[in-house]
Amino acid sequence: MMQPIKTIALSFAAVLLAGQAFAGATLDGIKANDSLRCGVSGSLAGFSLPDSQGVMQGLDADVCRAVAAAILGDSEKVEFVPLSAQQRFTALQSGEVDLLSRNTTWTLTRDTSLGLDFTGVTFYDGQGFMVPTSLGVSSVSELDGAAVCVQTGTTTEKNLTDFFRATGMSFQPVVFEGFEESVTAFINGRCDAYTTDASGLASIRVSNVSNPDDYVILPEIISKEPLGPVVRNDDGEMFDVVRWTVFAMLNAEEAGITSENIDSFKGSEDPNIARIMGDEPGMGTAMGIDDTWAYNVISQVGNYGEVFERNVGASTPLGFQRGINALWTQGGLMYGPPIR
């Protein structure tokens, strides 16, 4: 028997209301505190590391600033909380931080068993190896029997074991809890090689050693390491804001909108640009924030390309090319769904 049209309409309305009824406690707390508490590494050049003035710099740090701009209208309203690999998930789970933007790999078990949600990818990475130039090694295939420094509590540690098992080579793991401790041990010669994400290796090579030419990063990449922001899975509004903040930065780059020229796009008749600018109402209120959220993000922090280039790009000490982190229109994997 078919339901009366009125009953169906009421049921549909109830579903819509139910979808808007979740508390959004994290987002509400950020607004009440007028500040975003963002968990970062605080020790990785190019991603999150204080400069000589004590200001946190890096791609991960700028993601924090972008989210603060989206929620609070001010990219400077961020409290950066340095966290170790072991501390990061507990800090987010316990509410010590509102957002984790800390070179963290998105994996199935992390996404399903920790009460957390990955919102997307801000840097596609992969695990590699670095060795002293004096070792005379040019390939990971020459590391049979090597002592390898690795940080515990990371995907790196398991990838290392899986790789050597799969290749039939042997190795001696030299495991450390802290990042600085593991790097110092490698530099002091306690192991033949150091392994972590390629971005981390580049950071170590330019910021933790006295002469970068004394070390070489081997060419092989042994894993997929999609890095991105993480939130608790109890707040759909917060999840949406973080995810769409990154998408807005990607869409702005694709549209040619930068922090320098954004005001020239005001009054655009292109509806896609109008929604980024906040000229078409509803895109922000749907997430519990102001409709100018994307404008605030781009004008204060920049589009994704700007953030990439100033922190890890070709002109920085890390010297990364865009590669797979280029936009989809340029042969990369970065793709922002439409804001509409």
Image: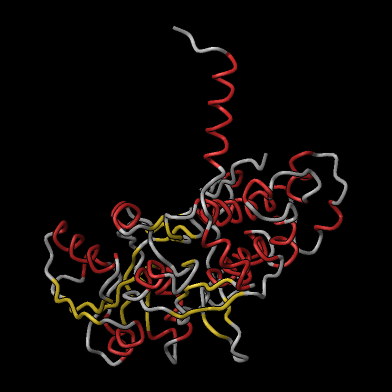
Question: If the image is split into quadrants, where does the C terminus sit?
Answer: top right
Q: Is residue 236 left or right of residue 281?
A: left
| Most foreground residue, 284 or 310 | 284
Please determine whether, in this image, residue 10 is positioned above or below residue 40: above
Quarter location, residue 145: bottom left
- Look at the image and tell me in which quarter the N terminus lies: top left
Image label count: 0
Q: Nearer the viewer, residue 105 or 86?
A: 86
The location of residue 323, given as percent across then percent down, is 52, 56
Task: Determine whether 155 is above or below 50 in the image.
Answer: above
* Residue 25 percent coordinates (x, y): 52, 60
Residue in view at x 30 percent, y 73 percent:
195
The structure residue drawn at horizontal position 75% and vertical position 57%, both measured from the top left corner, is 295
- In the drawing, does residue 60 fall left or right of residue 261? left
Q: Is residue 166 left or right of residue 103?
A: left
Residue 47 lies, in percent from the top left, at 51, 73
Q: Quadrant of residue 230?
A: bottom left
Report the front residue among 95 and 203.
Answer: 95
The residue drawn where x is 52% and y is 33% is 15
Whether 264 is drawn above or below 157: the answer is above
The color scheme shown is secondary structure
Residue 200, how many percent across, how many down? 41, 73
